[in-house]
Amino acid sequence: MTENSEAVPQEPPLAGDETDTLLGSLERQRRTLEWKCAGLDAAGLRVTVGVSSMTLGGLLKHVALVEDDVLSQKLLGHRPAAPWDAIDWDADPDWEWRTAAEDTPEQLLALWRDSVARSRAHVRQALADGGPGRIGAFVHPRGGSPSLRRLLVDLIEEYARHVGHADLIRESIDGLVGEDPPR
């Protein structure tokens, strides 16, 4: 997995505080997506289901982008990290989905794991600087800025939606099913 199991919660606590519950839920979604993508070769990461063009490789690259967008740019106001900083998003808005097929499984997992590691560091920084109510740098077009709490909920929602997609794709590849990876 991505970090020492002692440092990263295995699942949300049954009766934890707000921060532990949010982070536990996010980590569970991250771990489940990683499990659904693990052990596949490049062909496996390019499999689609039905009429959808979504792949597990595309999902990994997409959530790597979302991690950086939400917990680096929106939370802390950082400039986009590589490779996101070199993309003309107006010309190629689906770049991460389209180009995932060109990357090896190792490249995709490394990109995602690096984004997750940055996100964890950014969350620790924000928690030390105001807790879950810390206001992010992003200003919504209608005015106002989201709290870390809201950004974590948005990221959990993003992962949960895509973990559902990953469930279907992975089951179509080799029959792997289940909600939680083995411990």
Image (spheres, rainbow, N blue to C red):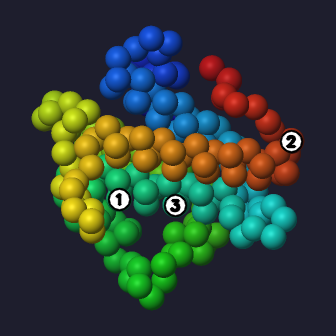
Indicate the position of residue 81 as horizontal and vertical percent values. Answer: 30, 63
Q: Distance between the Cα atoms at labels 3 and 2?
A: 24 Å
| Residue at 77% from the left image edge and 53% from the top image edge | 169
| Mark 2: few/some/many CA within 10 Å (<14, 14-19, 20+) | few
Q: Which residue is mark 2?
A: 175
Q: Secondary structure at mark 2?
A: loop
Question: What amino acid is labelled 3 in the image?
Answer: His
> Do the residues under discs 3 and 2 have CB atoms within 8 angstroms?
no
Q: Disc number at residue 62? A: 3
- Please, is residue 176 above or below residue 102 in the view? above
Q: Position of residue 159 (x, y in %)?
A: 54, 46
Residue displayed at 51% across by 50% down? 158
Residue 44 picture location, percent across and down: 75, 57
The residue to which callout 1 is attached is 69
Q: Amino acid at mark 1?
A: Asp
Residue at 56%, 55% in the rendered image: 60
Q: Residue at x 52, y 39 (%)?
A: 30
Categorize mark 3 by other alpha carbons within 10 Å: few (<14), some (14-19), many (20+): some
Identify the image quadrant of the C terminus: top right
- Check disc 1 and report its element: helix, strand or loop: helix
Number of residues whose C-alpha sits closer than 10 Å to that of mark 1, classed few (under 14), some (14–19) or many (20 or more): many
Q: Marks 3/1: CA distance?
A: 10 Å
